[in-house]
Image (cartoon, helix red, strand yellow):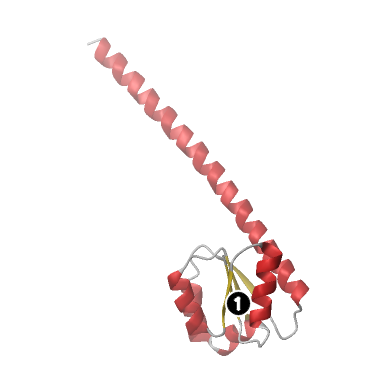
Amino acid sequence: MILLITPSARGQECAVTLKEATGEETHWAENLPQAVARLRESAYSTVVLDQFLLENEPNESDQVLEHLGTAFPVYLNFAVSGMERLLREVRSALHRRKRDRSRHASKAGRELKQAAFQCSTFVALAAAVIKFR
C-alpha cells in the first residue's frame, strides 16, 4: 500500500495514477495530520512526501517520519516534478523494498539453518555424554 502526502490539487489524480501504474492500493493525505492518522491506521510499503510540507511544517514532519515504520520514504517536490518522475521514484522505492525484504528473508533463513545445526550438534553431544556415563 502506498501513502501519498501532498496538498497539491492533483493529489487525488496522482493517487489514482499510482494505483493504476503499480497495482498497489494508494491513499492520499492532503496534510501532515491526515498522514499521521493514516500511518497509525495502516502499514504502508511506500510513503511519498511532498518536500513542500517537510520544509514548511518541520514539527508535523517529524511526527510523520516517526510513524513511517518499515515504509520506504520517497521525497518529491510536486511543484517541479511531473507524473513520470513520481511513477519512476515510486517504482524504484517498491523495487528497493522488495529487494531488501528478499535479502532479509535469505539472511533469516541462513541464521535459522545455522541455529538448527548448532542445536542438533548440542543434542548429539549431550546424547553422547549421557550414553557414556
| Amino acid identity at mark 1 | Leu
Instruction: State left or right for residue 18 relative to residue 72.
Output: right
Question: Where 116 falls versus 34 (above or below)?
Answer: above
Residue 13 appears in which quarter of the rendering?
bottom right
Question: Residue drawn 41% across and 29% down?
Answer: 118
Left or right: residue 9 versus residue 66 is: right
User: Which residue is painted at 26% across and 9% down in the image?
Assistant: 132
| Image: 25 above or below 30 | above
Relative image position of residue 50 (x, y in whole percent): 63, 81
Q: Quadrant of the N terminus?
A: bottom right
Residue 57 percent location from the top left of the image: 54, 88
Q: Nearer the viewer, residue 71 or 41?
A: 41
Q: Which residue is mark 1?
A: 49
Q: Looking at the image, which residue sits at the far left?
A: 133
Q: Position of residue 70 (x, y in %)?
A: 51, 62
In-front residue for pair 31/10 = 10
- Figure label count: 1
For the point 61% across and 82% down, the residue is 6
17 or 38, nearer to the observer: 17
Question: Which of the image's four quarters has the C terminus?
Answer: top left
**Quick one: which residue is furthest to the top in this view?**
132
Secondary-structure class at tag 1 = strand
- Measured from the top left, where is residue 39 in percent x and y? 48, 72
Mark 1 is surrounded, within 10 Å at the Cα level, by few (under 14), some (14 to 19) or many (20 or more) other residues, namely: many
